[in-house]
Image (tube, helix red, strand yellow):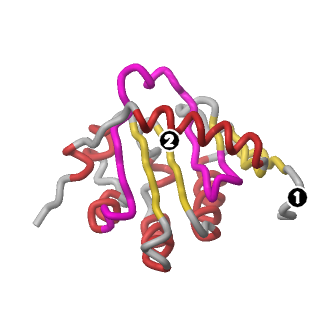
């Protein structure tokens, strides 16, 4: 994509979301922010997503980080989510938080990469969404994420290490 052009691509299936999410993670150079009700398993619970997150972080671990904010941590844990082990192993660079009750009203789900490009689903229960490259909108989404993050907290279910 041209760096100076705002673009939008409509997505309508879990497969499309998974493919574009994987591509975004693989293209990330600085940071990744994920806001999702239950880390939608049909999008995120795949070995290739876990591998891409690992590669992203270890490529330059001092400079790169991932923040994941989730509402329904029980579902994430009970479905044996594929990226949980990655989050636990790389907890210095991948931080997971449970969204506070006051912010659970936000029904959108998104992944934001490098403060520039994102995938947004306005309703986490639907696969209707868009891949959007728009720095101004990305900044607004980052502000929302930071607001949610500042009121969220760690959750022992997400961060527990099994030895």
Residue 18: x %, y % from top left: 58, 56
Determine whether the residue tagged by mark 2 lies in a helix, strand or loop.
Answer: strand
* Residue at the left extreme, as displayed: 163
Q: Which residue is drawn at 64% across and 69% down?
A: 27
Residue 23, by quadrant, is bottom right
Q: Which residue is drawn at 44% across and 24% down?
A: 103
Q: Give the range drawn in magenta.
A: 90-119
Q: In this view, does 163 lie to the left or right of 8?
A: left
Say which quadrant the C terminus sits in. Answer: bottom left
Question: Dot 1: few (<14), some (14–19), or many (≥20) neighbours within 10 Å?
Answer: few
Image height check: is 22 above or below 71? below
Image height check: is 129 above or below 90? above
Query: Of callouts 2 and 1, which one flags the residue occurring earlier in the amino acid sequence?
Result: 1
Q: Name the residue under label 2.
A: 35
Q: Mark 1 points at which residue?
A: 4
Determine whether the residue tagged by mark 1 lies in a helix, strand or loop.
Answer: loop
Q: Which mark is residue 67?
A: none
Q: Residue at x 49, y 50 (%)?
A: 42
Q: Which residue is drawn at 61% across and 66% down?
A: 28
Say which quadrant the N terminus sits in. Answer: bottom right
Question: Dot 2: few (<14), some (14–19), or many (≥20) neighbours within 10 Å?
Answer: many
Task: Please state which of the two labelled residues, at mark 2 or mark 1, is closer to the viewer.
Answer: 1
How far, Cα to Cα, is label 2 from label 1?
26 Å
In front of the other: 159 or 81: 159
Image label count: 2
Q: Is residue 126 left or right of residue 4?
A: left
């Amino acid at each position: 994509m041209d760096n100076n052009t705002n673009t939008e691509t409509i997505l309508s299936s879990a497969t499309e979301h998974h493919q574009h999410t994987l591509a975004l993670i693989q293209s990330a150079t600085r940071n990744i922010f994920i806001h999702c009700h239950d880390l939608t398993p049909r999008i995120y619970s795949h070995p290739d997503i876990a591998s891409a997150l690992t590669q992203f972080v270890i490529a330059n671990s001092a400079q790169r980080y991932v923040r994941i904010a989730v509402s329904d941590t029980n579902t994430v844990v009970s479905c044996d989510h594929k990226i949980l082990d990655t989050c636990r192993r790389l907890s210095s660079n991948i931080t997971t938080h449970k969204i506070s009750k006051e912010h659970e009203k936000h029904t959108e789900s998104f992944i934001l990469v490098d403060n520039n490009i994102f995938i947004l689903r306005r309703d986490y229960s639907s696969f209707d969404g868009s891949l959007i490259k728009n720095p101004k909108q990305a900044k607004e989404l980052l502000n929302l994420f930071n607001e949610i993050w500042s009121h969220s907290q760690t959750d022992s279910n997400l961060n527990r290490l099994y030895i």
